[in-house]
Image (cartoon, rainbow, N blue to C red):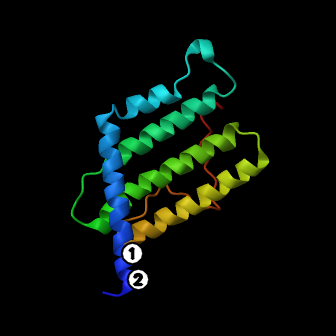
Amino acid sequence: MKASARSSVLLATIALVTGITTGAAFHAHGGSQWLLEMCAVSSSETTEESPFLAENGAAMTKMMEDMAVKPTGDVDADFVALMVPHHQGAIAMAKAVLRYGHNAQIKRLAQEIIVTQQQEIVVMRLAVGRPLSPSILSPTQVSTRPAPGTR
């Protein structure tokens, strides 16, 4: 096996083991409840940041729950199964900062995160022969759904 191939397999294995270990620890310590408590804001603490914290907390919870993947024995497929929800979580968090953030530089970074993470999801799914999700918008498409709380 070539050195570059060995290196790629090693990196994928490390990422998979890290993801599985993190997921196991996450569930052992109360899973999404811990995240909800970490991001929770009581009604007496409601601030301008509350909608962002709620949306970000929901994104993190969904990401961690979706990363609870049972290993299949296929390192590549398992890596993709772990990384896709991780990337989707990054996209959801970036969308939240676009909605609620104020710093133009951070908002530009969030836009770049959305584009690059979507591209990487497509590449990973294609690499393991998985179909693309119809919910993945290309960077030039705009969602017609209103943002939460804008109706």
Per the rendering, the mark at residue 55 is none
Horizontal and vertical percent position of residue 89 = 49, 47
Q: Amino acid at mark 2?
A: Ser
Q: Is residue 128 visible?
A: no
Against 8, residue 22 (above or below) is above
Which structural element holds mark 1?
helix
Q: Toward which corner of the image does residue 137 lie, by quadrant? A: bottom right
Amino acid at pointer 1:
Ser
Work out whether 34 lies above or below 77. Answer: above
Where residue 30 sits: x, y (%)? 33, 31
Graded by Cα atoms within 10 Å as few (under 14), some (14 to 19) or many (20 or more), the crowding at tag 2 reads few
Asked if the residue under mark 1 is in contact with the one under mark 2, i.e. CB atoms within 8 Å, the reply is yes
The reply, left or right, for residue 26 in relation to residue 86 is: left
User: Relative to 98, does residue 33 appear above or below in the rendering?
Assistant: above
Is 105 displayed left or right of 99 in the figure?
A: right
Looking at the rendered structure, the number of numbered marks drawn on it comes to 2
Tag shown at residue 4? 2
Residue ID at (55%, 50%): 91
Q: Which residue appears at 38% of the width and 65% of the height?
A: 131
Q: Which residue is mark 1?
A: 8
Image quadrant holding the N terminus, namely bottom left
Q: CA distance from mark 2 to mark 1?
A: 6 Å
**Residue 8, relative to residue 151: is it above or below?**
below
Where the C terminus falls, by quadrant?
Answer: top right
Extreme left residue here? 73
Residue 53: in sight, yes or no?
A: yes
Seen from the viewer's position, the closer of residues 109 and 144 is 109
Q: Position of residue 117 (x, y in %)?
A: 54, 59
Quadrant of the rendered image containing residue 140: bottom right
